[in-house]
Every structure is written in C-alpha cells, then in structure tokens.
Image (cartoon, coloured by chain):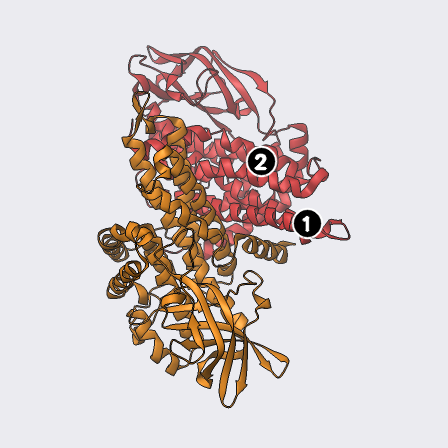
Chain colours: A red, B orange
Amino acid sequence: MDFLFTPEQLAFREQVLKFTIKELAPLAEEMDLKSEWSWEAWRAMGRFGLLGLHFPEKYGGANADVVTTCVAGEALGEGGADGGLLLAYGAHSFLCSDTIMKHGAEEQKEKYLPKLATGEWVGAMALTEPNAGSDAASIKTRAARDGDYYLLNGTKMFITNGPIADVIVVFAVTNKDAGPMGISAFIIEKNTPGFQVGKVLHKMCVRSSQTSELIFDNAKVPASNLLGAEGYGFVIALGALEWDRSALLAPGVGAAKRILKECAKHSNERKQFGRPISRFQAIQHKLADIRIYYEATRLLVYRVAWKKDQGQMLNHMEASVSKLYLGEQGMLAASDALQIFGGYGLMHEYPVEQYFRDTKLSSIGGGTSEIQRLIISRTILGEK
Amino acid sequence: MNYEYSSEQKTSFQAFAKLCNEQIAPKAKDMDKGEYKHVVDLLRENLKRLADFGYLGLRYPEKWGGTNRPYAEAVIYMEELCHACPSTFLSAGASSGLCGIPILTFGTEEQKGKYLPSLISAKIIGSLGLTEPACGTDLSSIKTKARKKDGKWILNGTKSFITNAPICDIAVVLSKIYEGEAEQGTGLFIVERGMTGFSTSAPMEKMGYHGSPTGELIFEDCALPLSALLGEEGQGFAQAMRTLEFGRIGMASGAVGIARACFDEAVKYSKEREAFGHKICKFQEVSFKIADMKMLIDTGQLLARYAAWLMDINDPEGDVLSRCAKVFATEAATKISSWALQIHGGYGYLSEFPIERLYREAKLGEIGEGTNEIQRVLIARDCLERWG
C-alpha cells in the first residue's frame, strides 16, 4: 500500500500544469462565454502530445499508463483548461480512440490512430439516442448488411464532438432479436454518404464542446469498418464507459483543486464586518468540505486508474463508486464554492460560475448517478 | 502507487477478521445490555484475546513486545475490530493507543519498560485524561493543576468523559503546571491506581458503547513522584495534540468499521424482508441507499488509509488528512447507521437487531477525538495557510 507517484509522473504533471496555465487557461473564459470551440487550444494539446498519450509509440502516442494519463488530466483541470475542451479531449481520447485501439483490427488502427493522436482528426463516440440514454441496450439505430457495406439508419443524440468529428465510433443493432448481444460497433468517417450532423445543441455546461444529433439515413459504411465482430458492440461500450469513470474524471479532480485554491484566496481577500470572511466559521466549514471532497475524489479516481494499470478484470463497481461520488458530492462542493463567492460567484468572470455549471455534467454524462447506484447495488445484492 | 496490501498482510487481516467474527462479535450484544460487572469481565477477556493476537502491540517496537507495523496496516485491524465490537475497539484504543502511544513517543526508557509491556499484553489497562467537565474542544482552558512540593508533583483537578477511567490501572493526564500563582505551561503525567489522592468515579451512563466504561479521573492533592512527568515539562499540550493525531486515525477507521457493520445488517435484512410481493432490496429506495453506503464506505476507507500512509512516511500533510478522514468517515457512519435502521423499519428500533446498538454507537465518532466542528476549523486553517 502506497500512494506515491513516480518522479517521472510528478515531473510530467508540472509540465502539463505549466502548459495549461500558459496556453489553455487564457482561452477558457471566452470559449465558455461564446460556447465556441477553439482549434487553437485543440492543436496546442495535440502538439504537446496529450491527445494520444496512452497510445503505443507506433501510433504516435507516448505509451503512458492510466495513472500517468490521469496525472495529465488532473493537471489540465488544475491549470484551468476550459471544461468543454476537457470533455472533448475525453470523448476523443478515451471513448473514440481508445475503443479503436482496444478493439480495432491492425489496419483500422494504422489508419485512424496516428491522426487521432495528433488531433488532426477529432474523434467521437455515439451510443445515446433520443429515446435511449440510461437504457443503452434499447438503442434503435439499425445496421443492415448489404454486400460489402452496412446500411445504418437512426439518430444519435447528445454526441460530444459530433459537429467537428472526423471519426465516430457508432453503436447500432445488427440483430434485433439478440438484445444487448445484437449490438455492433462501427467506425464511421464524416464524409460517409447518408450521414449528416444534425442540430447543434446549446447547453448549460461544458459549453465550448460541440454537441449535436447525428443522423444516419441509409448511411453506407464499408463492412471493413465493423469494430471487432458483430454482436460485440455492447461489451465495447461497457469498456469505453469504464474510462468514463476513471481517466475522464481526472480533469474534474484537478478542477476541484483549482476551485479550492480560489476559494481560499477569495475568502482571505474579501472583507465583511471588518474582517476577512475566512474568519467566519460558516466559510471555514465550506472550505473544509471542499477540501475533503477534493482529497476523496482524487483517491477514488486513482484507485480505478491504478487497477486498470494492473490489468485487473473490469471492476464496474469501483468505477461506479468513483463516478457516483464525483457526480453527487461534486455538486455540493460546487455549490459551497459558489456560496463563498456570494454575488461574485454568479458572475461569469469569476471561476466558480462555470465550475458550478460544468460540474453538473458528472452526475449525468457517462451514466447517470442513478445508473451508477444500479450497478453498485446489483453487484452487492447479487441481482441481475 | 499501490492500492493493495501484500498477500502476507491480507492473510493476517483474514486471521484477525476470523478472531473478531468468532470470538468478539458474538459478545457485542451482551456487552451492550449486560450487568456492569459481567460487561467488564467480557471486556477484559476480549482485551486478553487481542493481546494474544498482537493487536495491542501493532504500533510498538519488538523490544516492548510489539510488532512494529505501519499505520497503513494498523488501520485495517482497527476497522475490523470496530466492525465486530465498537466497545472493545474503544477501550483497546484508549489503553494501548491513547495511553500507550504518548508513553512510547515521549517517555524515558524506564517509563517505557515499566508500562508498555504490561499495556501491550493487557496485564494493565490504560486511559488518557484530557477532557474536563468544563472544557473539551477548548483544551487549553483546562483547570487541573500540578505543583512541585517536597520533591513530589501535587495534582488537583477532575478529568471527565475518560474512556476506561473506572477500570484503568494507569492514566496519562494533561495538567497545567504552576509555580506559586504563575502558570508554567502544561505537562503530561503518568498516574497509577493506588496513588494517594487519585480516585475514579462510577461509570457514567451513556447512549452507546456500554461495553466500554467511561468515567472521571479525580485528583485531590494527588502526590506523584517527579518521575511521573511524561516528556518535557511545559510541552504537555503539544504532546497531547500529537497523541490525538493518532487517535483521529483510529476514530476514522473505527467509524468505517461501524459503517460496514451497518451496511452488512442492511444488506442482509433487505434480502430477507418482503413487501408488496418482493424482497425489499428490489426497491430502489432500498437498493440505492445501499449503493450510497458503499460509496461512503469505500471513500472513508481510502481517506483513512491515505492519512495513515502519510503518517508512516512522516508527511506533514498527514495531520490535515487525518482530520479529513475523521470528519468524512464519522459522518458517513452516522448517515449509514440511520439509513440502515430505516431499511429495517420498525424492527430497526428494537434491541433485537444489532442496528439499534450500532446507530447509538455511530454518533460518538462525530464527537470523540476532537469534534468535527474543530476538525473543520483546522482543515480550513490548513487550506488558508496553503492557498489563501
């Protein structure tokens, strides 16, 4: 039992933190205010090597383990990179690229990974549909074999990076009588005939990330773009979601630390009744609770990361515990932080306003808190 | 980084869990409800078994009969014991922890040799006297006074809420030191039962932890040899604070143990009880509470283990993390005990089910070893110093 990071991990953390403060943080406020995607920020992340960090070197990555990947994510959050940018990074790196890396044929990997690693191509993953969210196995998008092609029909919803993605991992039903085992995964390129990006969606949080519907109308996908085998899609999706509950959460850990620091600073600077508000126990109580939240999320996220690195069997329960804690307690911490800032907390130029909105995503995206509770309780109670 | 214990450690944890389940847990109900004399007999028997296993000496060098295990390992044993019987956990902790640790940390070789082997083998029972009737959190305002007179320390005052007081053989006591009317700081003193002017009260009646006697230590011109001073004259307060660092880790781990016990009871009951034609664990109002319990237990465990590990490597952040762990785990335990009782419905209110006792025991965690209010003040102070 030890919680040590290697000297390399610590040095890398410092590099990512510096990079974030210098190149990403200055763009954050405007990205969020205008709900605007920043290619400048994206390309900078690509140049730094963050977008393919955990890929093998032959595909342009740095072969980083999961803990190191989380170290980078935490530093991105702590340094103040925009929440929308970090979500885009997560969807690109872990939901799309990693899925191709884990389940793709060698040809598919060689074709897609190097360009995804540099960020020249943007990746996305499309599972959710207008009428299938938590109940992911009930998706209706169909894929029918037609010679050397599959024809896809259906609509995907809330797809992060949808409007800007070059490569999308899409889940569709190939055998409607087989339930979850009838779902398959496909790699779809943006110029595929019959595929179009639907309405771009405006949202309350992570606003700079681009979200949309994806529409498949007899979209003609080469059969060679099937990922893994037919019927293997649901297993692939579950693997991707496990990332959702570890590395994708690491930026949130860093963001919590940033907000904690901001709160400490603000409460020492802000004076009321003739003294800094940090002298009031009501403020101290909130600071303490935010600190506990930060320390706890960090331990939970790295536990999942470390276990992934040990090559242990997927432990859905521990991943869900970590996701549930961040999602539920995160909102409380964000609310405390905003309260410390009072009226200023509601204003966009102060950092907690965006943090408060962005944090709400973690109790919904990547499996709602309710789904996490379902997974945890089923595991404990031994039910199906 | 390594989130797991070695296989040797796990083997030993399992052996200890077996001891707890087979020999200690079955007595927990009796220790809660039994006659005082019987309860004390059971407690002594349990302490003996713990000594035989090596539990009481986990944190002590071999020289004194201990096994010198790191804190990050000790927390697992503490959690397991409290899972089985909170009363035994509390009394064991007050004796070999709160009383023994300051002797180990600040004592002379002579003092260590005299007391530690006996504490570790449960030949004697120890206690620590800090709190007084009129001061708990505000420890610097204690009224107990020690004066030097004719080559002796003369101690006067009363310590209250002292775990093990009615049965203790020795006590480590915090007192102010006076020369004439001038206060000269504070000191820790080792007091032995039988010393003139030292007595203990009858056990206090309390809400929970009935198996662990609590009472007052009373000093009326109690005469102590000069050698009874523990550590440095004037440093008593600082020494007491350092002792509490370890106490907090214990309180956090104990709380996780109680939380786990409540969780176990809730899971078991919810799989047995039927309503509307289903086991009640089929209802999300029940099963999601169980999920939330699991979330809080895992998180509390990680915080306690992390804080303990920081202490093992002498990282100064161990102090604040032990506070975070204590606050989190003790509040998790009270929430979980309340949810678990709720899942039992009316049966939860009956003494027949262990949850009624656990619910009463969980609450102590938020108060003992420094209330959660003072912990938050000090956690906030750390944040303000670091980042303000």
- Element class at badge 2: helix
Q: Position of residue B14 (x, y in %)?
A: 24, 53
Residue B74 lies, with reference to residue B99, above or below; the image says above
Q: Are marks 1 and 2 on the same chain?
A: yes
Res. A81 visible in picture: no
Name which quarter of the figure residue A31 lies in.
top right
Q: Residue furthest bottom?
A: B150
Q: Nearer the viewer, residue A247 or B168?
A: B168
Q: Which residue is painted at 29% across and 31% down in the image?
A: B271
Callout 1 crowding tier (Cα within 10 Å): few <14, some 14–19, many ≥20 = many
Residue A289 lies, with reference to residue B89, above or below; the image says above
Say which residue label 1 marks. A267
Callout 2 crowding tier (Cα within 10 Å): few <14, some 14–19, many ≥20 = many
- Element class at badge 1: helix
Residue B153 lies, with reference to residue A239, above or below; the image says below
Q: Nearer the viewer, residue B159 or A69?
A: B159
Q: Position of residue A116 (x, y in %)?
A: 47, 32
Q: Which mark is residue B85?
A: none
Three-letter amino acid code of the residue under disc 1:
Ser
Q: Position of residue A340 (x, y in %)?
A: 66, 43
Q: Position of residue A227 (x, y in %)?
A: 35, 24
Say which residue label 2 marks. A83
